[in-house]
Amino acid sequence: MRFFIAALLCNLLWMPAAGLAEAEIVTPKMRQTAEKLAATALQDTTAYDLVESLTTEIGPRLAGTEAEARARDWAVKKLKQLGFKNVRIEPFEVPLWQRGVEKAEITSPFPQPLYITTLGGSVATPPEGVEGDLVSFPSLAALQAVRAGSLRGKIVFVDQVMTRTQDGSGYGVAVQKRRETAFAAHKAGAVGALIRSVGTSSHRFAHTGQMKAITDTSVGPSVPSAALSAPDADQLARALSRDEPLRLRLTLTPQTQARAPSGNVIAEIPGRERPDEIVLIGAHLDSWDQGTGAVDDGAGVGIVTGAAKVIMDNLRRAPKRTIRVVYFGAEEVGLVGAKAYAEAHSRELENHIVGTESDFGADKIWRFDTRIAEAKLPVAKAIGDVLLPLGIGPGNNEASGGPDMKYVREAGVPVVTLLQNGWDYFDLHHTPNDTLDKIDPAKLAQNVAAYAAFVYLVAEMDEDFRE
Amino acid sequence: MRFFIAALLCNLLWMPAAGLAEAEIVTPKMRQTAEKLAATALQDTTAYDLVESLTTEIGPRLAGTEAEARARDWAVKKLKQLGFKNVRIEPFEVPLWQRGVEKAEITSPFPQPLYITTLGGSVATPPEGVEGDLVSFPSLAALQAVRAGSLRGKIVFVDQVMTRTQDGSGYGVAVQKRRETAFAAHKAGAVGALIRSVGTSSHRFAHTGQMKAITDTSVGPSVPSAALSAPDADQLARALSRDEPLRLRLTLTPQTQARAPSGNVIAEIPGRERPDEIVLIGAHLDSWDQGTGAVDDGAGVGIVTGAAKVIMDNLRRAPKRTIRVVYFGAEEVGLVGAKAYAEAHSRELENHIVGTESDFGADKIWRFDTRIAEAKLPVAKAIGDVLLPLGIGPGNNEASGGPDMKYVREAGVPVVTLLQNGWDYFDLHHTPNDTLDKIDPAKLAQNVAAYAAFVYLVAEMDEDFRE
């Protein structure tokens, strides 16, 4: 029991392990510099200016579109203007899926239109749509449990509610229905599928999002599928409670093109002593097609760039290690840019000291999570102490690092997550409401400050996060 | 000066005038009955059940459509089931305007779509749309001041912000731009017009609404016109700040049909002593086409009906005067039902003791306004005292009575407004977001309680509100 409490305290307090004194990891001078950079970042408007420019001058930038290409050109120009080195595009290809007509209506007994959005990757209905009786399921699991072919001619509706959480954990649960419903509905013999939006909003916008990754060729056949806004899902639930068969018509005419250009945009602050060692900070440049991608993920683009810019402009000499800023392409449709990056840089990954992506909105960072060697938790503790005055507390050692860190993380690169407050994030997420006015410049600046301090410390210290 | 202060006090405190003692206007027994009715109303669910039924089983019900006709049939059935007498439809005709395609996009230099909604009564563009450089005006007045023909080929944008107010007074100012912009733009030679939505929201839905009344044949020529959501208006303002010509394409294909059926639905609780004397309580049955008309004005339908129902079911005998519930048709397109009512009942109007409409949402009533003879303010004071425990304070003597009271008020019928808190009302108003989940049953019940007390007192008392 005493051992247990001691272990708990050790974990909670990140007590330095033997042989790694905090003051050796982050020297008083380094701490002072990090604090100065954070203070400067709180006053710097680079991040906000970038989001403003990107969302205004480009707007929506769906993976594989001409708009995403314009965004890459915009990025190269901006990163060069800001003074970064080695600015380049690393191109790759991605299938291009684009929404067409999207219409749903109750045809009987209460004729009325419904507000929906086609799910990314959905197949199309015939131009005149499909019509069928609606069958509701309280969960994806309930749909998956029905006998194959038993819903012939029906339209299925998975009416599962997402939980609002600060750490975004509700999403991981809810997103399964977005990924799987169209396939389960096909197995059951249905002609179409609707889900209650993966989101926490009460407005009338449905939340879009990708089904399986657009590059996943292993997936089986599926039916046309769309998300309903929360009020429309409520409406269907009420209409179904009348105990009359509810008939719907669903018309979705998205189109897919096998190959379209995408790419990652990269910029660097070369390290002064160990340029081969890389501190990777990323965000994604693409967005869904209905908002202007301000919160998802223009904010991230602004934050990581703003942080690197503050480091670049306010130090006499560059940090020891290279700071690499990556704007990933084609994140929304299935981490296509993340995979391309991990492949293109596979030989370099062992020299990636740490990776992190800002892709969870624009609210304040409240927690510092890591996924690093247990033995190196004292290093995280030393950094975490510098972040505390920004209102950021210690977290766990199970960080994802952000969506686009998936492949580098799986390849062994240590990652951290500077976790933002996600309480309101899924009110906007993947809806037309994701626009610049939803970003609070002061909260954005807190993010920049945290990234600036973190990135500087890791780029300047001698320690790393591996065994 | 002393006279002024005395007059002010008299006005503020509604001090009884000579000869009209409060206890004679509202006897202690009447007050007790009114309080009991209010208490019962706070527990009664008739109002919410009606809104739930109307918004679910009918949904949107634009004036002149088949859906509005279904709503009238729904109303007749419900009112009879509830036990009202003399339930009938008074039919009239209305032009039918229906939206078609509505698309706006920046074509240069920042191609991207914009979120708009066609204004009710707008003329159509050619099917391929109109394209022109955007010219922004800070106000309707600024647009009206330009030289005739000086904006040939342009698309105009009136970027005037609406003020959020509790009493709704911001709307009266802002709505002028919705009514007048398309006509002023035509005079200036423009090919299309956009306005910042008449609304206070920050979501991405534009607010629709009628231009001039659909029955107004005196209006001059106009251009196709639409409202932008607030974030889109902000986006245009930012895009214009880049000092490059901003080119837009606008495609609107609404259609108008000269005549379609509409009607008012009427139900009564006949008075036991003076059945010819009428206490008129109304709401409107039609709605805009994009929401389900929950807050505008399903709530009003529920409130006035629920109040009358509580009176009908909880008194041993009906009140002395007739209580008449009117569901007006075709309110949104220009008070067509209100005019039809005033014309059909012109001979009866002198026997209308008072009129009031609930058409300002579903939030709590906070103020009791009147428009009655000065000499009868003590009667209002006596009633207002009974409303005070519901959190309703005294207001002014300049009430409109609600939109559909316009013509009966102009014909001399005294009116009152049980004024709801409108702070959030214009976040939802005339958008798809106007759905049932936006109604708080407890707040709705406070409205029913206030109406029940007010209507009972006026129907039972011997006083009236005329000189």
Image (spheres, coloured by chain):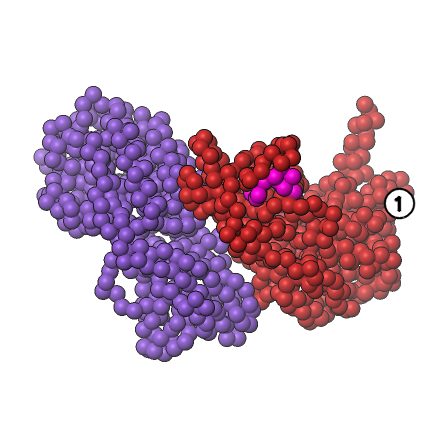
Chain colours: A purple, B red
Circle count = 1
Q: Is residue A147 magenta?
A: no
**Closer to the camera, B440 or B153?**
B153
- Label 1 sits on a secondary structure element that is loop
**Closer to the camera, A401 or B140?**
B140
Q: Is residue B344 visible?
A: yes
Q: Residue at x 52, y 70 (%)?
A: A107
Q: Is residue B188 magenta?
A: yes
x, y percent for residue B86: 78, 68
Question: Which of the chains bears the disc numbered 1?
Answer: B
Q: Quadrant of the rendered structure where residue A179 is?
A: bottom left
On the rendered structure, is A319 left or right of B151? Answer: left
x, y percent for residue B8: 78, 31
Q: Is residue B303 visible?
A: no
x, y percent for residue B289: 58, 57
Q: Which residue is mark 1?
A: B467
* Quadrant (top left, top right, bottom left, bottom right) of the N terminus of chain B: top right
On the rendered structure, is A4 left or right of A289? Answer: left
* Quadrant (top left, top right, bottom left, bottom right) of the C terminus of chain B: top right
Boundaries of the magenta span: B183-197
On the rendered structure, is A117 left or right of A11? Answer: right
Please name the amino acid that badge 1 sits on. Answer: Glu
Q: Quadrant of the rendered structure where residue B322 is?
A: bottom right
Q: Residue at x 13, y 36 (%)?
A: A277
